[in-house]
Amino acid sequence: MARHRILFVDDEENILKSLRRLFVDEGYDIVTANSGEEALTKLDGQKVSLVISDQRMSGMQGVEFLSRIKQLTPHTIGILLTGTADLRTAVDAINSGSVYRYVAKPWDDDECKIIVREAVEKYEIEEKNRRLTRTIRRQNKKLKRLNENLERAKELLTISFERYMSEHLLERILQSSKPVSLSGEKMPVTILISDIRDFTSLAESMTPEGLVKFLNRYFEPMVEIILDNEGVLDKFMGDSVMALFGAIYTHKDDSLRAVRAALEMQEAVERLNKQWVQEGNPPIKVGIGISTGEVVAGNIGSEKRMEFTVIGQDVNYAQRIEGLTKIFPSSILISEPTHAEVSEKIRAVRYAPTEIRGKKEPIVVYGVEGLKTDGNT
């Protein structure tokens, strides 16, 4: 049995001695007081499990005293000693909740011990529940803090990544149970690189402020199209845009998404040109190269500055293929591996093998003319 402190209160010394004698061998710490006022003084700063008080005492009566105890230490259990004449008072006190039980005088020793034991057991159960409640509250607070930290981390992650991918794609990544690796991983990726033709001459004809305004106006729809097709914006390189399809989050049709994005980008350029011509500015032409192959994707840089990108021959191939749009009549050129993945969905023309820098053998590229009737799925 846990060590419990019991306070006996009675203005008759012989009753206090009888109670002490009855419980001295029960393993309790016994404290006695001759009045309610003295008991309140002794209780100050002490934890007491149980208070047994006589009803009829000089000064403060038992029910009043136990009510005060209940207000000061709500968890302390009160038992009222009472004679036959005060049974109604004892019952009313029990009904009001200020008293747990009463012991009628003269008491039976065994019955009195049983009542006290039950009261102590009740205190132990309630104390365990209180400890459990406190533990649950602490855990809930920790859980709340963890959830708040998680939400803050999610917000920071969203702010960091929403510049590179669509909100829809980011939400799917955040909800996915599959971990996303950003530390360096080989994976098949389709790379799209777009570039404005004769940009140097165009830039020389503009003021720095006008050039920045022009590029922002051009990049706005280009980036939106890439993100709408759930590609990842890798970087801007002057007037060029590099986008990845299949990095971080893969789809079964990443190559087709890249081709669809390229077609939509050319349509957006036509709309921009109409506006620029109406404003008295020259139209622009944009070349797009697309290549599919295995690359290494991951965070590249230093501890102070890092960015997610891909490294591999097909990154260079996409750039070289984009350069071939100056030679071939198509403004969108794709590599042979890309064409193999999308040939059933697109209309394309095959060009003769062509040499590009960085590759020993000539490569075959295809000029994309559009999607087939059933290629919009």
Image (cartoon, rainbow, N blue to C red):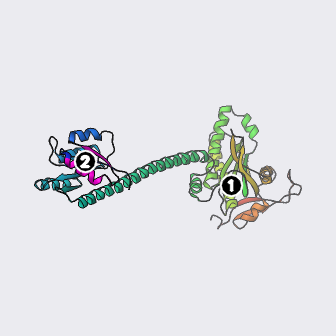
Q: Amino acid at mark 1?
A: Ala
**Vertical arrangement, residue 341 with respect to residue 164, above or below:** below
Q: Secondary structure at mark 1?
A: loop
Q: Secondary structure at mark 2?
A: strand
Q: Earlier in the sequence, mark 2 or mark 1?
A: 2
Which image quadrant for residue 350?
bottom right
Residue identifier under label 1:
247
User: Callout 2: few (<14), some (14-19), or many (20+) C-alpha neighbours within 10 Å?
Assistant: many
Residue identifier under label 2:
8
Look at the image and say whether residue 164 sits in the magenta stretch. no
In the rendered image, residue 62, in percent from the top left (x then y), is placed at 18, 47
Number of marks in the rendered image: 2
Look at the image and say whether residue 15 sits in the magenta stretch. yes
The reply, left or right, for residue 145 in relation to residue 118 is right
- Start-end of magenta stretch: 14-33
Which image quadrant for residue 178?
bottom right
Instruction: Give the Cα separation between the discs numbered 2 and 1.
Output: 77 Å
Q: Nearer the viewer, residue 264 or 20?
A: 20
In the rendered image, residue 238, in percent from the top left (x then y), is placed at 72, 40
State if disc 1 and disc 2 touch (CB < 8 Å): no
